Amino acid sequence: MGGGAVVMGGGLAGTLAVAALLGHVDTVTVVERDRYPERPVFRKGVPQGRHLHVFLSGGQRALERLFPGIVAELEAAGAHRMEAPRDVLTRSRNGWHRRLHEGRHAVISCTRPLLDTTVRARVLAEAAGSGTRVEVLQACEAVGLLGDAERVTGVRTRSRDTGRAERDLPADLVVDASGRGSRAPRWLAELGRPAPREEVIDAGIGYTTQMFRPAEPLPMAVVIEARPDLPRGAAWSPVEGGNWLLTLAGMRGHHPPTDGSAVPDFVASLGEPYLRDHLGTCEAVSPPYAYRDTANRRRYYHSAGGVPEGFVAVSDAACTFNPVYGQGMSVAALSGLALRECLADGGPRRPGFAARAQRAVARAGETAWLTAVGADRPYVAGGPATPPGAAERLQTWYFGRLADRATHDPVVGAAFRDVTHLAAPPTRLLSPAVALRTVLLPRRPGPAGIPLRVEGAAG
Ligand SMILES: Cc1cc2nc3c(=O)[nH]c(=O)nc-3n(C[C@H](O)[C@H](O)[C@H](O)COP(=O)(O)OP(=O)(O)OC[C@H]3O[C@@H](n4cnc5c(N)ncnc54)[C@H](O)[C@@H]3O)c2cc1C
């Protein structure tokens, strides 16, 4: 062990990066622009925190490895753990997914404030016995990087309190966890290092979320996916305290309303009377909140020469995803684990550490990136820059057919969920059993009406 790290941003990814660093460096200083609230409530620095956030099973497993027992802790605090597809009924473009009791994947659903507070408390508790001293500087903003083109040696900070004092924090490793608005590309350029190449795939999704309190809660969450002829959807999911979140999403021209009185009409337009009628019995306990910055955006820090020594970007600062796939927090957990494994293989002072860690972080988000951009590419405004070649057309045909078959075929459905829950790489979709069923068996629709009855264990 040795050296010191500075983590820019104390959101979920920053907190998980601290977890990874415990026991591997002498000190960790977290620089967080906001002040943390005393209770688990919304805070400005995480504007997406008002929207529905589910933790996929692949991410949960990574979170459990970082903090054994955390899922039970979240459940004890009021989070809901729901098995998919049994407790998360999903209508796809090919009809509903069968309501199977598959027993492979579960999602966690709670508010972001509850999740963030629980994880932060756990990290601080674990820091106590780790040998690493953790200091959290609140109301303190990172405003630049120190060092040169070859090595980042620290962070320039500015207090947000009166006086706005500046302070330089030296570090052997700087972790950028400042989220999608990260200014690190500009700061690296100021040090003479080229900013990373950036790729943006934007399906033009708009989001609106409103909190409700049902008189009689449903025994399951409901997801209605957008489809080409109806590019709008919804998710209805329980959170702690007897409340439920309704998230509405729509592509360009179909953005959901931001006026609460228009929400029922948008829900009615989805053509799902069961959800519409249920919502009619619920009391709205918040106004609707909108969010529009939903593009998939990847900064290629992991390419050759992408990062100087002493600098690693994680989670949203490196890669963001269209939130409808519910992947960002899971990728933060998978990245935290990847960072910890790199640290175990030699501390941050070891030559080449930054590039190695950055590649490991990119691998941790690879499945999420491939699935999100694969699904969104056809919806980019103006179409793809170059017409898709034969290989890409074949890929689109195969994955479209596979997603349709997943609604009713237990073998294909299990593989589909393994990948979409980030518990297996996309190659899982090419296994012989899955490929043969996808290609040879006839395409038929999933159930037409919402499947309220649970089917037995999947065969
Ligand atoms: C609408 C929406 C819905 C989503 N739904 C899901 C979902 O269902 N499931 C899922 O897994 N993911 C979801 N995500 C993604 C998820 O919100 C993020 O991936 C996750 O929060 C990880 O973010 P982060 O910690 O990297 O960044 P953030 O959450 O953005 O945190 C960044 C932190 O850095 C601080 N900060 C920023 N700049 C500075 C600075 N210069 N100096 C100091 N501090 C700074 C901020 O105050 C903040 O605390 C959703 C995202 C959106 C937008």
Image: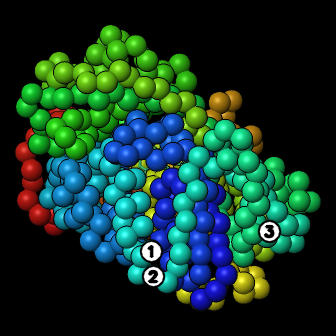
Measured as percent of width and height from the top left, residue 399 is found at 46, 53
Q: Residue at x 51, y 45 (%)?
A: 35
Mark 3 is surrounded, within 10 Å at the Cα level, by few (under 14), some (14 to 19) or many (20 or more) other residues, namely many
Measured as percent of width and height from the top left, residue 435 is found at 40, 65
Q: Which residue is mark 2?
A: 130
Q: Secondary structure at mark 1?
A: helix
Nearest the camera: 204 or 54?
Answer: 54
Q: Earlier in the sequence, mark 3 or mark 1?
A: 1
Q: Is residue 438 left or right of residue 456?
A: right
Nearest the camera: 415 or 133?
Answer: 133
Give the quadrant of the N terminus. bottom right
- Residue 127: which numbered mark, if any? 1
Q: Earlier in the sequence, mark 3 or mark 2?
A: 2
Q: Which residue is mark 3?
A: 152
Measured as percent of width and height from the top left, residue 308 is found at 80, 70
Marks 1 and 3: in contact by CB < 8 Å?
A: no
Q: Hey, what amino acid is under mark 3?
A: Val
